Image (cartoon, helix red, strand yellow):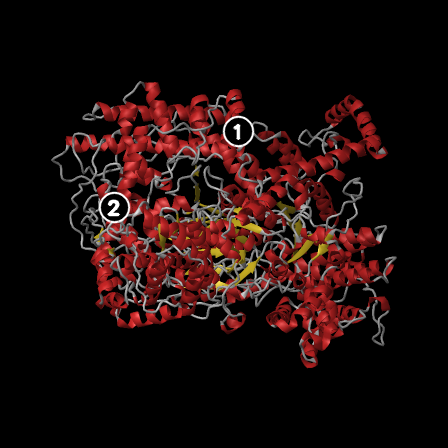
Amino acid sequence: MDIIGDYAGDELFLLEGDSLLSGILDDPLLAVGKEDDVSFQYLHARYSFERTLKEYVKRNAVFEVAFFEDLRHMSYHTGSSDFVLASRCLTRTYLKAAVKELRIPLHTFQNLNDPDWLRFAMDRKPMFIMTDDGGSAQAGERLQAETALNQRLFVYEILTSGIAVALMRGAVFKDTKIFSFIYEQRRMSNNRSIIDPRIWRARGCAVVCLNAKLPPLLSNIRTTSENRTEWLLNAARAVLAGVDPGDSLARPFLYIFLAHGVILDTLPVSVRAQRLPTFSSEVEGYLRNKFLPSLFISLERSFPDMPTFRDVDLDGRVFFHLLKAIPPQSLTTEVMSDLIGLEHTSKLAEMGNALGMDNAVFSYPLLGPRGLVGLLPSHTDQNDFRVLPFSHPVLDEYLSQVQINAAPSSFPPESGRFDLDSGLGKVFKDNMHWHRPGRPILPKHLGGEDGKIQTLDSKARARVLRADQRFQAGLKLQAQSLTGALGKRLEPITIPLHGKATDIATTKPRPVHAAASKKVTSREETRRQVQTKRQTKKQASDLEWWSGKGTNEGELWKLSRLPSLHSRIQKTDLLLRNRTRMAENWLVGEVQLYRLDLELRAWIDHPTRDSVSTQDRYRVSVLRMIKDQSTRATPTVIRVLSSVLSALGFPTVTASLLGAGNLPDHDLTFEFIKVLKKSGSSVYPFMKITEPPMHWLLRCFGEYMDRSLDSAPDPRVQFDPDRWQREVLDNLDEEASVLVVAPTSAGKTFISYYAMERVLRSSDDGVLVYVAPTKALVTQIAAEVSVRFQKGQRSCWAIHTRDYRIHDPQKCQILITVPEILAIMLLSPTLARVWTPRLKRIILDEIHSIGQEVGGAIWEQLLLLAPCPVIGLSATVGNPEKFNTWLSSVQAAHHFKHRFIYHEHRYSHLRKYFYLRSAAQAPFTGLRQHKPTGRLRFLHPVSMLSSAIGGALPPDFTLEARDCLTLFQALRKLGDTAGITEDDLGKLDPTKFFDPPTFLKQQHILRYEQTLIRVISKLREMPASHETLQEIVHQLTDDEIYKAPDDLLSIAPEITELEGSLPHLVSDLYAEGDLPALVFSFNRHQCETHAQKIHSFLEEAEEIWRTTSPEWQSKLQAWEVYKSKAKDRERIKERIQRQRKDEDDGVQQDTAWESSFDPSAPSPEFSFAGIKTSYDKTSLESDLRDLRWTSTPDWAIAAIRRGIAVHHSGMNRKYRNLVETGTLALGINAPCKTVVFSGDTTYLTALQYRQAAGRAGRRGFDLLGKVVFHGITLDRVQRLVLSRLPPISGQFPLSTTLCLRLFNLLAGSQNAEYAVTAVSTILSLPQISIGSEIGRLELLHHLRFSIDYLLRAQLLSSDGQPLNLAGIVTHLYYQEPNNLAFVALLRSGVIHRICDQSQGKAARDLMLVLCYMFGRRLLPRSAVNEENLRPLVKRYPSMIVLPPLPKAVEYMLNKHDSLILRVFTGYAWTYASQNATNLGSDDQLPLSGIQVPVTSSLMDWEFGRILRSTALTTFICSKFVSNSGHTDSFGSIEELCRNARQGIHMNGHPIPSMNNIFADNESAFKLNAYLLDFYTHGQVESLVLANGIRRGDVWYFLQDFLFTLLTIKTSLQELLRTAATQQACAQDETQDSGVLEIEEVDLDDGDSVHDDGFTRPRGVDNADWKVYEVFSSVATDFEAKFRKMWA
């Protein structure tokens, strides 16, 4: 995962210090602590350390560093030689001091039992610790297994303490993200007892062993050093104290070491880039085994407490060069003065005097000629690859910014096979569909070429027609089910063809009084009079229908005759739902008032009317009725309602709620109950509230308050939009781009459909593209569009995804698609001529997907390529202002106005609950009898605040009205101790805050909420208020949660307990009226087991009930009797039919309950089906019958009958369409009352939490949504609620393949304006370039490198034309870098040699190569274990593990990878060498910015001249890395980019390296052979059971691979056809410019690869044709097996 963007956000995490240092010290390039190198290059170590930490800092990671002393052996490499151990010991202390100097918080603990650690973990609550997992023990490494065991148990203890672990080794820093593997935490109180006790004993023995191997000197007491001189002297004294009397080298070596310490801070970094001098084996042995280990330990024991970089800088190679520069027979002050100058010699003499070395004359014959080697000359790597020249009229402006003067290289471009006799340089022309050879993209009249159009026979046409009809019927059904949850259906809008249509309203609504000034004509006056008469007649009719005018036929009289008050209430509710009759405001008001009268009488008659809960319930009901009626009231009704408000205790809010009455007055048709005496007191005292009105409204009426925010009528839409919604409409009318960020349920949906209607009305050829992140959302939007809009006699919409197409994407006006397909179309030069200019608007729903690692770059490309205004929609954009700044600049570059509209308030609140587990489970006897268990405990938002989780509150931290009241009451209870004055506290009292009193609306609550949140935020910022805040949290915490044992709150349940409690949870939701619900689990298998558990729970309870219930037995007997009389009923029915005179009369249906009774169907008491849905049983059974022919398991079909469904991408597609809710809730219109998060997982991130929780309580469905946390620890819940959305971060938008596609766009469109603008925007305005010069330079460097690579690979001509095999590369763009590797194999001739075998052998070997290239899936180590593998291979026909690549293929891939490295290195060398002056000096450390001297007076002395003459000269490599002796020679792309000097900004991730295609050794990784296995045996079951492919993934994986085969085959056809044509017309200079066209295919459309009729073109040689034949054979065989699988 991306541990910052996806996981941690701005939460604190820890970098475990020894893992961090181990990664630094294990770098093979670093000359510190290596067995084969006695150097101690601390300058390089400090550079690497700062560079690593900077990777975290520049990504805004919130981290601190923690060292655990028990883990120090990992960085020490305990068990290594004394030299390595001592060196790494000193380096650990050196780099720990660097952390302090960098002002990064540093902590040191002994182990996880350290009280300081326990206190830190409790107070600071780090989200995770980034550490290593111990690796694997390697043979020959002493004590490595002990170190690994110690580390792994550390990881285990961290995880079981409730803190997650992220792997540090192997972390990838890519763009703005940090990717690492995360181990999910699971707190366990019995963590030690779970593991075999022998392991704990082994760890104890391991620690004893490791500690015993530490140098004895490490136990010495530390000596305090105040500065550099004192540090060196203290260390020197310690060394001298341990020198053997016969050791003649220690004192002179120590003296020279001090000399190196004196001069080091004056040496330029450039001269410190030295190779390691060579010594005799005796000298090197002495240094390694005696002198340096003693020196390093002494330096570590004397290390200063708070040193600066210069205080502790050391350089082994400077020391060694100084050692060699001194004459070997004598060491005197005069000699040193000549070497390093008088000033430095004087300092050295002072140090010598302090050590008793005055008048020192040392003789060390061991360093005579036998011990020394001559001085090494300076070295410069000359790169033999130069950048090839290139010029392009569109790109020259950008290429000039990287300032490279290209020169022809001595290495010619690669050549190879597939060039035919026409030679190199063939322009590739591909105007045909990708997977349907011979079929042109465009018809001939639009500029397309002649092609073979397949005609379908009558049978095939009928099959296609039936499939289309089934799909259309399914869409309509889906639209009804998605929008009809409250019984409302969409009203279709019929839009005439252009010329007959009137434009949609494009002006703002006019003021109501505007019509008063207009003169009324006689015709208009007559029309008004007619309308008045009709209205009067209608009112008379309604009055007669309602009151009966004194007769006994009116509805009012009928109601009075009903036997009970309850029946009158039910009947009145039915009347109010009569939309036809209830069209008149006065009648609605009259019937509503009658309903209010009944409600009051019901309250009076209620047996518990004096209880608080009953009073509150009826007051809420009465006030809701009054609120609904206030907009359609007469003065008489106003008086009645005012009396009711006074009786309830709300006389002060009457005016703000009721007004004066807006309808003509008339007498009531019934006598309203009297609730108020003449004196003004209530007739029924129990009705009156006993608390202040504002308090009661906050406590009880919050969710029913008016939610509108400055809403007003607008003729453009059929509802009263809020102010922000009207701003959206205004901007759409002005053809501006908009970014709308508003919470789910705020009301964003209408925006898309308003934009669609505008485009449909404006013309008949304008196109709007709706881009959705998932195919599920594509289908849902298409369903609504198909019902909403009708235009002419043709479909105005189309769907285009990679799996299927519905209608023609090029002929529709509303295209609904996914990002990848739109990117393909926008990059198509053919479509650029005829389709792209038609684009009027692009809607990007869930635009926050641009921040995702997978597919995010495609979203960014769409925004950069878009030739029209865009609409961006999202509910979850972190830091939206920053993202909008970038988006605004992109739109400005395209000359479009842009507006950002941010609305932060949800329409319906989300109320959160914690499911409190209990071991006791009450017996379940049915849903109707189920009583709530009380385990759903309310979570007050403030109760989740804790000083342990600091930082600002997230923007979506909200308080409901009742939350505001309880928070105020908690503050008032604390009084002055809350840090709030009595005066300020008084102002927070709702009675004073809402003065004058008013009937509260949501806008009033928002103002009160923000005031209270400011108070809480202030308390969180004040350390002195910690105890006060905790007391507030205590008061607002649910009592049951507060009293619950810690294990229930902080330890997640086992999976059995989780699943066992889930049925009781959903039963509680049923009893509380909180269904339907979505239960989210981020584990596919767990989704299915959850559903199975609930289903079996209901099924088993039903079976018991049916066995014991007299009611069921009686019903069953009655049904049996009914069945036995079937023949009698049939005879009676026939007799009645014969007696009927009117044969047209319908036959009377049998309405007896027995006629529809099905004893095998679920009983209502044990089924959730039919809750709040318009989906009837008949429709359900019809759809379930269709599922019988799919792979849907029986349990899933049975579960649907009980209202239980599963949705994840692995389920059957038809099944998913039936229960569509949307993978990970990405915007699917799946309204529900409650969202349940069941079980914790790392994937439950801040973004996913908000996306999923947003499904609850959607606008128009619920006034309140509920979020339930089930099986998630309370502190995890706190993190989720208080987390902040990660900011949308840019990704590197350019790849080598995209460069080729851009050249194709330019060439095919002949540098059309759209193409030029698109390329310009991509190169100048990617997100990574905003506010960062580095990002822009990385992009331009990659562009220039890609051009050089494409030129050398013969994929691009010198003037920018795509060549040769470019078609395969661009068509397989999503496979980079493997697409480039595959083309390299084609060009090398290796594929030709493979195909030049027998047909069977050639096909199998080719398939093996393809399996290494495409559809790769790694096998886990456990899967390739021989013990596990053998029985599977024996039982199933799969080989499971992919065999090794042929050696020739491996050799060519290595060769090509070497070419890529040489090209990239050559480019970097050319740029750096030509721009050395502009790049400046490379002398600053990357994070601290500390500057190492550039020049020094030492350079005037002998030793300075020696260093200058032997220094390494580099252009690419950093001078700090050269400190370990490295030059401009690199082993990999990653190594080059990581070690490049300051000013060279290279991004290695998009470089198409081939390292991942095969392993360098047998143990590196193994690939799953599932594709080769399927090609061999075609058995899906074996892929699932043997190869371990999830059943739901099989179809998708095989389909993706088949697409790849078809793409390659078609590309080869076009290449052979084009090459043959160019050979035959070699003299024709009018050839087209090489357009590459892109088109996806629907495998359901009946097209097949084996009937394309392609024959060998003239001029194609045998070898090339053989390659095509083998490819065609492989594709045909694979497709045949694939179609047979799902037919």
Instruction: Compare residues 543 and 998 and report the one nearer the observer.
Output: 998
Mark 2 residue element: helix
User: What's the CA distance linking mark 2 and mark 1?
Assistant: 43 Å
Q: Which residue is mark 1?
A: 1584
Q: Of all residues shown, which one is farthest toward the right?
A: 607
**Residue flagged by tag 1: what amino acid is it?**
Val
Residue closest to the eye, 254 or 688: 254
Three-letter amino acid code at the position of disc 2 = Val
Classify 10 Å Cα crowding around label 2: few (below 14), some (14-19), many (20 and above). many
Q: Secondary structure at mark 1?
A: helix
Residue 766 visible? The answer is no
| Contact? badges 2 and 1 (CB < 8 Å) | no
Q: Quadrant of residue 653?
A: bottom right
Q: In the visual, does 742 lie left or right of 392? A: right
The circle drawn on residue 1008 is none
Say above or below: 83 vs 443.
Answer: below
Closer to the N terminus: mark 2 or mark 1?
2
Relative height, residue 243 to residue 1663 (above, below)? below
- The spot of residue 79 in percent (x, y) is 48, 45
Where is residue 219? Give x, y as percent.
53, 57
Within 10 Å of disc 1 (Cα), the crowding (few <14, some 14-19, many 20+) is some
Residue 866's place in the image compared with 786, above or below, is below
The spot of residue 425 in percent (x, y) is 18, 38
Question: What percent of the width, then of the height, locates residue 131?
Answer: 51, 51
Per the rendering, the mark at residue 1463 is 2
